[in-house]
Amino acid sequence: MATKQYTREEVKKHNDNQSTWIVIHNNIYDVTPFLNEHPGGEEVLLEQAGRDGSEAFEDVGHSSDARELMVKYKIGEVVESDRQPVKEKKNSWSSTSADASSNQSSLKSWILPIALGVLATIIYRFYL
């Protein structure tokens, strides 16, 4: 079964609580039945209705459960000529060489306070 394709102009027509479509990463979702269930409230979805909500969706940092739930609301995809490049999602928990060096400097920033705490404890016990 082929995935139905829509233009962004078609999606723009579905921008109220009677018909709420949102584009996320070139996929189109009809979230009308989900409006009352959305944990952030229906207003959050209605702000993005008829538009591309990819950036807003990623900024919130939705869980893997939320991403799995999206599957049942997918109704199609944006036509090839209207597609926008999908930005790579960067997981804060993934480790790259840049992240590794960042983690090392983060560890170093904890060493001094811990060392000072141990030193203060030793001095306190010695004098009392």
Image (spheres, rainbow, N blue to C red):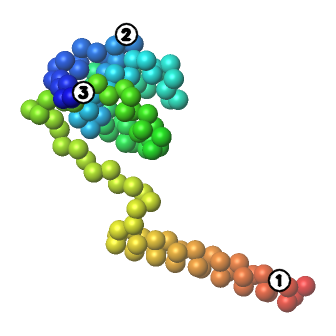
The residue positioned farthest toward the left in the image shown: 81
Front disc: 3 or 1 = 3
Front disc: 2 or 1 = 2
Residue 31 appears anywhere in the view = yes
User: Which residue is disc 1 drawn over?
Assistant: 124
Q: Quadrant of residue 7?
A: top left
Q: Label 3 amino acid?
A: Gly
Q: Is mark 3 on a helix, strand or loop?
A: strand
Q: Which of 10 and 102 is in front in this view?
A: 10
The residue drawn where x is 45% and y is 44% is 64
User: Which residue is disc 2 drawn over?
Assistant: 18
Q: How much space separates mark 2 and mark 1, taking CA atoms? A: 69 Å
Do labels 2 and 3 touch, CB within 8 Å? no
The residue drawn where x is 58% and y is 74% is 110
Quadrant (top left, top right, bottom left, bottom right) of the N terminus: top left
Do labels 2 and 1 touch, CB within 8 Å? no
Q: Say few, some or many: other residues with alpha carbon within 10 Å of mark 3 (under 14 / 14 to 19 / 20 or more).
A: some
Q: How much space separates mark 2 and mark 3, taking CA atoms? A: 19 Å
Residue 125 percent coordinates (x, y): 85, 85
Quadrant (top left, top right, bottom left, bottom right) of the C terminus: bottom right
Q: In this view, does 73 lie to the left or right of 8?
A: right
Q: Label 1 amino acid?
A: Tyr
Q: Nearer the viewer, residue 108 or 13?
A: 13
Residue 123 percent coordinates (x, y): 79, 86
Q: Residue 76 carries which label?
A: 3
Residue 39 percent coordinates (x, y): 53, 29
The residue drawn where x is 19% and y is 18% is 10
Residue 68 percent coordinates (x, y): 42, 38
Circle nearer the N terminus (3, 1): 3
Q: Say few, some or many: other residues with alpha carbon within 10 Å of mark 2 (under 14 / 14 to 19 / 20 or more).
A: few
Q: Which mark is residue 109?
A: none
Q: Label 2 amino acid?
A: Gln
